[in-house]
Image (tube, helix red, strand yellow):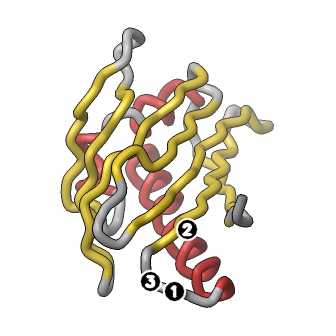
Amino acid sequence: MADRTSSSIVINAGKSEIMTIIADFPAYPTWAEGIKSAEVVAEGSDGRSDQVRFSLETGPIKDTYVLAYDWEGDEAVRWNLAVPGTMLSGMTGSYRLEDAEGGVTRVTYELTVDIKIPMIGMFKRKAEKIIIDAALKGLKRHVER
């Protein structure tokens, strides 16, 4: 398995509130940079999404793909690429939420992305880091507003 890129941020809210926002896929275009649409295509018995179709436009990358989700209550969510896009050939990731001192929550985002065009590993990790940092900052702004 490829190396994962990871980053964390502290958000001034509880795990339940943050996970509710993470699970609200149709709202992603309002806070997740590059996401143009997110459509739930399969819902699980717990009421959370099992599969979501995303349309992404960030820089030169424009793609549509489906992610499959595995939820662990308000503690974590993991995903992998269920239906590849024209550029994306693989994606695995997760959000992990941990209580931190002072009633805040530490959110850790891990991501591995594989694309169909060759890319030097160093550049791929840098792109993953940009995606992660933008997502964490967008999530923090959205939750704390």
Residue 93 lies, in percent from the top left, at 57, 50
Residue 6's tag is: none
- Residue found at the very far right of the displayed protein: 101
Relative height, residue 41 to residue 5 (above, below)? above
Say what secondary structure mark 3 lies in.
Answer: loop
- Residue found at the very far top of the displayed protein: 45
Q: Is 72 left, or right, of 43 in this rendering?
A: right
Kindly identify the amino acid type of the residue bearing the numbered disc 3.
Answer: Ile
For disc 1, the neighbor class at 10 Å (few under 14, some 14 to 19, many from 20) is few
Q: Residue at x 40, y 66 (%)?
A: 88
Kindly identify the amino acid type of the residue bearing the numbered disc 1.
Answer: Pro
Do the residues bearing badges 1 and 3 touch, measured as CB atoms within 8 Å? yes
Looking at the rendered image, the disc whose residue lies closer to the viewer, 3 or 2, is 3
Residue position marked by numbered label 1 in the rendering = 118
Q: Residue at x 53, y 29 (%)?
A: 70
Q: Earlier in the sequence, mark 1 or mark 2?
A: 1
Q: CA distance from mark 3 to mark 2?
A: 23 Å
Residue position marked by numbered label 2 in the rendering = 133
Relative height, residue 89 to residue 53 (above, below)? below
Say what secondary structure mark 2 lies in.
Answer: helix
For disc 3, the neighbor class at 10 Å (few under 14, some 14 to 19, many from 20) is few
Q: Earlier in the sequence, mark 3 or mark 2?
A: 3
Residue 30 lies, in percent from the top left, at 24, 55
